[in-house]
Amino acid sequence: MRVKLGINPIGWSNDDLRDLGGETPLETCLAETKLAGYDGIELGHKFPRDAAVLRPILDLQGLALVSGWYSTALLTRDAEAEIAAMQPHLALLKAMGCGVLIAAECSNTVHGNRAVPLADRPVLGAGEWAAFGRRMTRVGDAVAAAGLELVYHHHMGTVVQSEAEIDALMAASGASVRLLLDTGHATFGGADPVALARRYRGRIGHVHCKDIRRDVMERVWAERMSFLDGVVAGVFTVPGDGMVDFPAVLAELPGYDRWLVVEAEQDPAVANPLHYARMGRAYLSRIIAP
């Protein structure tokens, strides 16, 4: 596979629970990203949102900006309002040379609320998918018109979590809505990432490589834990350190030549970010080596 290896800064500083790694400077994250051997990094909450400021910071470490998350609110506003709201984010990604914009519906998500168990997350009714898909497609069309691709991030605690919900979104949306395959969120949500890779290989535009510790995942469901409590307990880890069959997933993506992004939100006080960044890259490098 001719791919590029990137990482998400969430292992150094958590975006949803900012007490995790809150004291870690952005400079440490970027320096250790380069030290671990990565070519690029995704946005985090400590990154400047002005390309003229951000570019020299990344250039100093020889890093590319891979992409950045955008929270849509299409269950509470129409596509035109969403397109207007996303323009600063879209402009930043375009100025930084990114190829994709990561989107996830977050108007009613519970993934950032420690008081709500994952089991009580919101769900869409059967009659709501068509309208949601139309709106997301309209947003995807606007992103495509700007020269990028919208990749939808299925995510725990949101309305697109399970395999059935991923299928529903893909069926309800048009070609401008591509899929971000996240191996960890797929597994956590009860989906088979190998089957998803096989089924949607033609629409997968981005891949997050995240592993799952099976025992912690089972405890999250058994004890009705929140998403963030699961993160703190260590449900996620880097590729090769959990239950996901990465060789099988990547075997279903012949010709994929985009970014593989290591992403594993953990407590950096427990899981040293540089150590795990190196571990994840070393494992993926062995798989993709010719």
Image (spheres, helix red, strand yellow):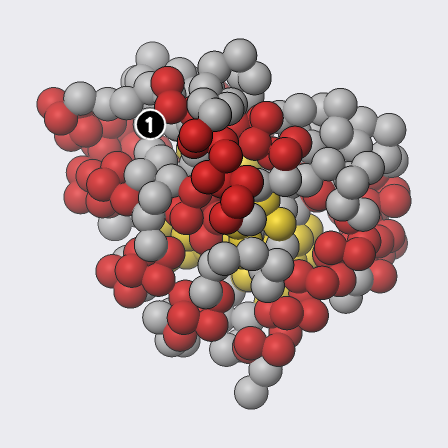
Given the image, on which type of amino acid does mark 1 rest? Answer: Val
* Res. 215 in view: yes
Relative to 226, does residue 100 appear above or below in the rendering? Answer: below
* Left-right relation of 270 to 45: right
Residue placed under numbered mark 1 in the picture: 159
Give me the residue at 26% from left, 37% from top. 165
Closer to the camera in the image, 46 or 117:
117
Closer to the camera in the image, 246 or 168:
246
Q: Residue furthest bottom?
A: 290
Provide residue 203's location: percent of width, then percent of height: 31, 57
Task: Tell me the element at label 1.
Answer: loop
Residue 197: name its quadrant: bottom left
Give me the residue at 33% from left, 19% from top. 122
Give me the residue at 11% from left, 23% from top. 127
* Left-right relation of 176 to 151: left
Closer to the camera in the image, 245 or 100:
245
Provide residue 287's location: percent of width, then percent of height: 55, 76
Provide residue 96's location: percent of width, then percent of height: 65, 48
